[in-house]
């Protein structure tokens, strides 16, 4: 099993196996704040309440107020860098597969779709076929379907979608329920785009810029995890943008639009068949 060999502050630690009533369980440390997706959603609900409605005795209230997206996302990048440096592709990165400990340190988890790349192969070579989560899946994987082979580049794409998920507090392509229409939208070039988000007056444009670089259609156009570490350390994502490029913006609550390509279809009234 791959998981039991991993040792990094931003990767969930494997403690062992427990057998209870003929059932086998994998054991890991307790994560006080649960998964990242649920934490962000709960935080948005808390912050939208007026002062009279807020339960300041809620033990998570202080974490809701002091939570810093930048620090947590930087921790996730460190975890991804560790995995890729050890020839490991996660295969299913998303906020629900990132847990938060008692001081909000992120821990990448759920290695059910993970596989080690043989050392004689290039790091971007075949790692894993098959399943994943459509909303976070790169266009090349969607095009290849059942024959899809996951790579470090597809991990990076999924991470970009995870950033959008965290900043918007919504699933990627939340306005589309059909898996088929999600796939068509991504292949056609549709990507998340949102309206201004600030926390205490500080824009999160640098994180949105990082996400935008991660979900490029061409795998070779996406940054590596090492590139992302350097970008976050420098904090110069915008300074390096070309003249005439406008800064991306991020949504506060609910207003999560998507950039549409010249290929379009009616996805707003789709049924739930094939939904994720």
Image (cartoon, helix red, strand yellow):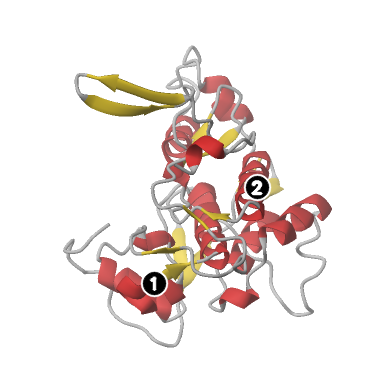
Judged left or right of residue 136, residue 166 is right
* Residue located 57% across and 61% down the image: 156
Check residue 82 in the rendering and tell me which mark sits there, or answer none. Answer: 2
Above or below, 71 against 268 in this view is above
Say whether residue 83 is visible: yes
* Closer-to-camera residue (239/4): 4
Say whether residue 251 is visible: no
Check residue 95 in the rendering and tell me which mark sits there, or answer none. Answer: none
Q: Which residue is mark 1?
A: 148
Q: Residues within 10 Å of mark 2 (few under 14, many from 20)?
A: many
Q: Earlier in the sequence, mark 1 or mark 2?
A: 2
Q: Position of residue 268 (x, y in %)?
A: 27, 69
Q: Position of residue 77 (x, y in %)?
A: 64, 49
Above or below, 153 against 254 in this view is below
* Closer-to-camera residue (13/204): 13
Q: Residue furthest front?
A: 120
State the SS at label 1. Answer: loop
Judged left or right of residue 164, residue 20 is left
Q: Position of residue 212 (x, y in %)?
A: 60, 66
* Closer-to-camera residue (234/268): 234
Residue 258: quarter of image:
bottom left
What is the spatial separation of the Cα atoms under label 1 and label 2, in whole angstroms?
24 Å
Quadrant for the N terminus, please: top left
Q: Position of residue 57 (x, y in %)?
A: 49, 11
Judged left or right of residue 24, residue 164 is right
Q: How many marks?
A: 2
Q: Residue furthest bottom?
A: 262
| Contact (Cβ within 8 Å) of mark 1 with mark 2 | no
Quadrant for the C terminus, please: bottom left
Q: Residues within 10 Å of mark 1 (few under 14, many from 20)?
A: some
Q: Residue furthest top?
A: 57
């Amino acid at each position: 099993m791959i998981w039991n060999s991993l040792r990094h502050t931003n990767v969930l630690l494997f403690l062992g196996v427990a057998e209870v009533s003929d059932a086998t369980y994998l054991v890991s440390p307790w994560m006080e704040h649960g998964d990242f997706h649920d934490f962000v959603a709960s935080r948005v609900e808390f912050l939208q309440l007026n002062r009279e409605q807020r339960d300041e005795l809620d033990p998570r209230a202080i974490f809701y107020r002091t939570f810093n997206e930048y620090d947590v996302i930087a921790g996730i990048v460190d975890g991804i860098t560790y995995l890729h440096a050890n020839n490991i592709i996660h295969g299913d990165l998303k906020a629900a597969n990132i847990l938060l400990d008692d001081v909000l340190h992120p821990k990448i988890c759920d290695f059910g779709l993970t596989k080690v790349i043989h050392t004689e192969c290039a790091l971007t070579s075949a790692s894993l076929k098959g399943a994943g989560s459509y909303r976070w899946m790169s266009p090349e994987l969607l095009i290849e379907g059942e024959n899809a082979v996951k790579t470090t580049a597809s991990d990076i794409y999924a991470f970009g979608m995870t950033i959008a998920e965290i900043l918007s507090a919504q699933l990627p392509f939340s306005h589309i329920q059909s898996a088929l229409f999600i796939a068509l939208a991504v292949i056609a070039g549709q990507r998340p785009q949102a309206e201004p988000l600030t926390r205490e007056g500080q824009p999160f444009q640098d994180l949105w810029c990082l996400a935008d670089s991660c979900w490029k259609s061409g795998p070779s156009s996406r940054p590596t995890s090492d590139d992302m570490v350097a970008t976050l350390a420098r904090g110069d994502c915008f300074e390096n943008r070309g003249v005439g490029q406008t800064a991306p913006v991020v949504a506060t609550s609910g207003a999560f639009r998507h950039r549409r390509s010249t290929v379009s279809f009616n996805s707003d009234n789709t049924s739930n068949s094939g939904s994720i």
